[in-house]
Amino acid sequence: MFIPIHDANHLRHIRLQYVTLAIIALNIGVWLTTSMGGMQFTQLAAISLGYIPSVANELAMLPPELELVPWPLTYFTYAFIHGDILHLGGNMLFLWVFGDNVEDAVGHFRFLVFYLACAAAGAAFHGITLPDSQSPLIGASGAVAGLISAYLILHPRVKLWVLAFARIPLRMPAYIALALWISTQFVMFLAFPEDQVSWAAHIGGIVAGAVLVVFLRRPGVPLFDRNLVTPKAARLD
């Protein structure tokens, strides 16, 4: 419904969001590596590094030659594998727009913990809803969903530039665009629980992000833009 383009939200505690940039670079690097090997190589990477619920729930086993990492690590590795350029580009755009301010609010190291925890929560909820699925889950959407809910809790009143319906540029408060996005994820999960898109992973990330940001934020960082001053007309004595 809305594609974020830009937010006028300056950094307050850090000079550079280097963890966000490193995650974006790593995702791009992994995608370039897998895509250069062709579709078959991408599929093998998805199977070996993606999160497979039936394997995680010990209902199935991968062939030894495909076990590149122990299966518990796939709760994290799946978030760095993408199927195509649109899949990658969409997730990285959201990460670019919202990641810097969440990193600013929690700090560099805790942002990395936050991001990986949201990814793991997305995989875990996907695995709960489809416990015997043998299809690998890939993509950073669960982690990105956590960023979106955290940003909504931190900065609901910040103005965002978005593309409505991928065409119409609009400037609106974050709480409108992001609340609509989050609501859509829940509606789609209830309507299409076994869709090709894992709405469950999005919801797992959303819930994790909303909870974690409250506890991981720096001391003194307010929630809901409570320190944002709104100019009003002067009073005359």
Image: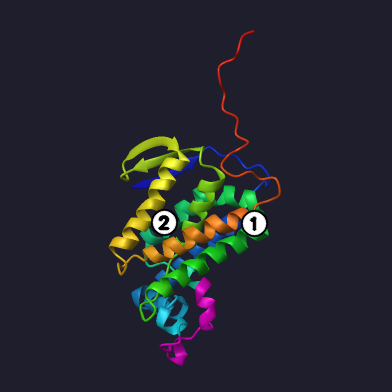
Residue furthest top as drawn:
237
- Above or below 114: residue 14: above
Q: How many residues crowd around disc 1 within 10 Å: few (fewer than 14), some, or many (20 or more)? A: some
- As for residue 74 lying within the magenta part, the answer is yes
Distance from disc 1 to disc 2, alpha carbons, whole Å, reads 28 Å
Residue at (38%, 61%) from the top-left corner? 87
Residue at (54%, 84%) from the top-left corner? 70
The three-letter code of the residue at mark 2 reads Gly
Query: Are the residues at dot 1 and dot 2 in contact (C-beta closer than 8 Å)?
Result: no
Where residue 188 appears, x then y in whole percent?
32, 59
Q: Is residue 120 left or right of residue 43?
A: right
- Above or below 109: residue 179: above
Q: Which type of secondary structure does the marked residue at label 2 adopt?
A: helix
Where residue 90 appears, x then y in whole percent?
40, 55
**The C terminus sits in image quarter:** top right
Can you see residue 30?
no
Instruction: Pick whichever of labels 1 and 2 is earlier in the sequence.
Output: 2
Residue at (61%, 64%) from the top-left corner? 113
- As for residue 2 lying within the magenta part, the answer is no
Nearer to me, 161 or 176? 176
The answer to which quarter of the image holds residue 58 is bottom left
The three-letter code of the residue at mark 1 reads Leu
Q: Magenta segment range?
A: 58-76
Where residue 92 appears, x then y in whole percent?
47, 56
Instruction: Select label 1 or label 2 by which is in front.
Output: 1
User: Mark 2 — residue?
Assistant: 89
User: Mark 1 — residue?
Assistant: 216
Can you see residue 206?
yes
